[in-house]
Image (tube, helix red, strand yellow):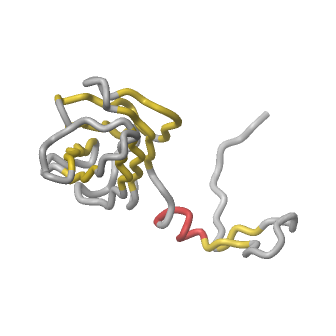
């Protein structure tokens, strides 16, 4: 029989198979300092598709050339949160990105462009979400 309950702690520690690094972490870091959503995806074929692992992501939607919307499974606490993004192009092109103003607690939109700021799809993306969950 398994009972549900609450465990309260300030620091989480390991029993010791880690060497040369910290063996404990403050519980506040786990809840506020860790990635809340991540995804690797491709958008070079005019259709954005998952290209690897994802976490806490319900779906991604291709909005057209250079534009993708991501729907988060567990909502964020606020509508503005950091989203580090690493776009790339395997053909050697330089890619830039910007967040759209359509950022909400449930979804965010990323637009990509080339070095001349013309919208374009690119074939390599990785994005994550930081902040507090609702």
Residue at 22% over, 43% down: 109
| Residue at the far front in the pictured view | 92
Image side of residue 65 versus residue 3, left or right: left
Residue at 75% over, 69% down: 13
Kindly indicate the quadrant of the structure image that contains residue 118. Answer: top left
Image side of residue 112 versus residue 8, left or right: left
In the image, 83 versus 92, the foreground residue is 92
User: How far from the left and from the top, in percent, is residue 117?
Assistant: 13, 51
Location of residue 41 with respect to 110 vertically, above or below: above
User: For the N terminus, which image quadrant?
Assistant: top right
User: How far from the left and from the top, in percent, is residue 52?
Assistant: 51, 34
Image side of residue 105 versus residue 42, left or right: left
Location of residue 129 with respect to 63 vertically, above or below: below
In the image, 124 versus 61, the foreground residue is 124
In the image, 102 versus 6, the foreground residue is 102
User: How far from the left and from the top, in percent, is residue 130?
Assistant: 40, 59
């Amino acid at each position: 029989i398994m009972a549900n309950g609450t465990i309260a702690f300030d620091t989480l520690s390991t029993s010791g198979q880690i060497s040369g690094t910290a063996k404990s972490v403050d519980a506040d870091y786990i809840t506020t300092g860790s990635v809340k959503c991540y995804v690797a995806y491709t958008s070079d074929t005019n259709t954005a598709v998952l290209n690897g692992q994802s976490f806490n992501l319900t779906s991604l939607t291709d909005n057209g050339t250079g534009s993708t919307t991501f729907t988060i499974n567990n909502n964020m606490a606020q509508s503005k949160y950091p989203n580090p993004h690493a776009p790339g192009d395997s053909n050697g092109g330089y890619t830039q990105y910007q967040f759209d103003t359509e950022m909400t607690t449930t979804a965010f939109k990323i637009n990509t462009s080339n070095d001349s700021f013309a919208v374009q799809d690119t074939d390599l993306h990785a994005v994550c979400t930081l902040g507090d969950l609702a």
